Image (cartoon, grey):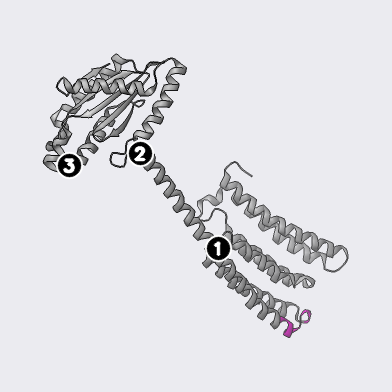
Amino acid sequence: MGVDSRQRLRVMRTLWASGVNLLCLMIYLAAVYIGLIDRFDVFLTTAFMLGGALFFYIAIRSGWSLRLSDPALTMPQMIYFMSVAAFAYVVVPPFRGVMTVTMALILVFGAFILSPLRCRQLGWLAVALVGIALGITAIRTPNSIDAHVGVVHFLVSAIVLPVIALLAGQLSAIRFVQKAQKRALTEALEKVRRLATQDELTGLPNRRKILELLSLEERKARRQLLPLTCAMIDIDHFKRINDSHGHQAGDDTLVLFSSLLSSELRASDVLGRWGGEEFILLLPATPLVEATAVVERLRVRCDKAGLWAQRPELKVTFSAGLATHRPDDALQVTIARADGALYKAKAEGRNRVVSN
C-alpha cells in the first residue's frame, strides 16, 4: 500500500476497482462450471481484466504515475475497464445485459473523482463503446443477436448512460464547490488566527501572543533552572512623527523599527508589539547582564543615521527597561518591573537602557 497517505488512497481505489472486477470474474467462472459460457472466452476476458488491473497497480504503487498530471490514472482506468465491459459483451454472449450496468457503475465512480466535464465525456464514450461492441458482434457472430434487439439496446444505452454521466457530473460539481468552500473556510480561519496572534501592521506577535509565549518560556525556565529576562522598549518622541509627518509616516516608522530590531536579534529571542509605539522583547536563557548588553547593542544600532538614509525624517531612538523574572513572582510583576525600568530610562533623558 505504501507509506504516503495520498499514494495509499490511490492504490486503495485501484484495488477496490479490481475487487469489483474480481467478483464479476467469479460469476463468469461459475457460469463456465455449469456450462453456460465457453471457457476460452472467459480466459480472454480474465486476461484482459487482470492484466489491466495489474498494470495500473504497478504504475501507481511504484510511483511512476507521479510524473503525470493525474497520478491516480483515474480517467485511463475508467476508460480501460469500460473497454473490458465492451470486450466481454462481444465474447461472452450470455452476459451481454451486464455491460450497461457495469458502465453505469463506472460512471457513478466518476462523480467522486472526476470533474463534471470529464464525467460527461465519459458518458458519451460509454455510448460509443456500446455501439462499437454491437457493431463487432453483428460482424463476428451475426446470428447471436437480433438486429432489432441490438438497436433497442443501443438506444436505451444512448439515453441512460449520458443521463447517469450528467448526474455524476452534477454530484462532482457539488463536490468541487464544497472543496472550494472548505478551502475558503480554512483560509478564513487561518486569517482569524493570525489576526488574533499577530500585529497586523508590523507582523510581530501581538500582546495576546506574547503573553502566551512568555508563559511558555517561564515554565521552561523554571523546569530547566534558566534565567528569563524581559525588556520593555518604547520609541522616543514618537508623537512628534505623527504630528509632523502624519499617521502614515508613524506607521512606516513602526514597520521600519520592528524590522530593524528583528533583523538584529538572536534566533531564541522574541520581539512583540505591546501596543502603540511600545514593544516587548523576551530573552530566554539570558541573565540580566547579558540581556542588557543585547538591548544596548540594539539601541546603538538603531541610533546610527545610516540605517535611516532612505527615510531620514523617520529616524528614531528608543528607551528600554529590563527585568529578570524571579521564580516566586507572577509574570505581571516581572513586566511591571521592566516597565518601571523603562520609565526610569525615559526620566533620565531617553535613548538609554536601564535594568531593574
The answer to whether 299 is drawn above or below residue 25 in the figure is above
Query: Which residue is depicted at the point 75% across and 70% down?
Result: 91
The quadrant where residue 301 appears: top left
The type of residue carrying mark 2 is: Gln
Residue to which mark 3 is pinned? 249
The type of residue carrying mark 3 is: Ala
Query: Which residue is depicted at the point 13% across and 42% down?
Result: 245
Q: Which residues are magenta?
A: 143-150
Callouts 3 and 2 close, C-beta under 8 Å: no
Q: Residue 144: give x, y in percent of width and height.
A: 78, 79
Residue to which mark 2 is pinned? 198
Q: Residue 209: give x, y in percent of width and height.
A: 38, 34
Query: Which residue is depicted at the point 15% across and 27% down?
Result: 304
Characterize the local packing of mark 2: few (<14), some (14-19) or many (20 or more) Cα atoms within 10 angstroms. Answer: many
Residue to which mark 1 is pinned? 172
Query: Which residue is depicted at the point 71% across and 58% down?
Result: 20
Mark 2 or mark 1: whose residue is earlier in sequence: 1
Mark 1 or mark 3: whose residue is earlier in sequence: 1
The type of residue carrying mark 1 is: Ser
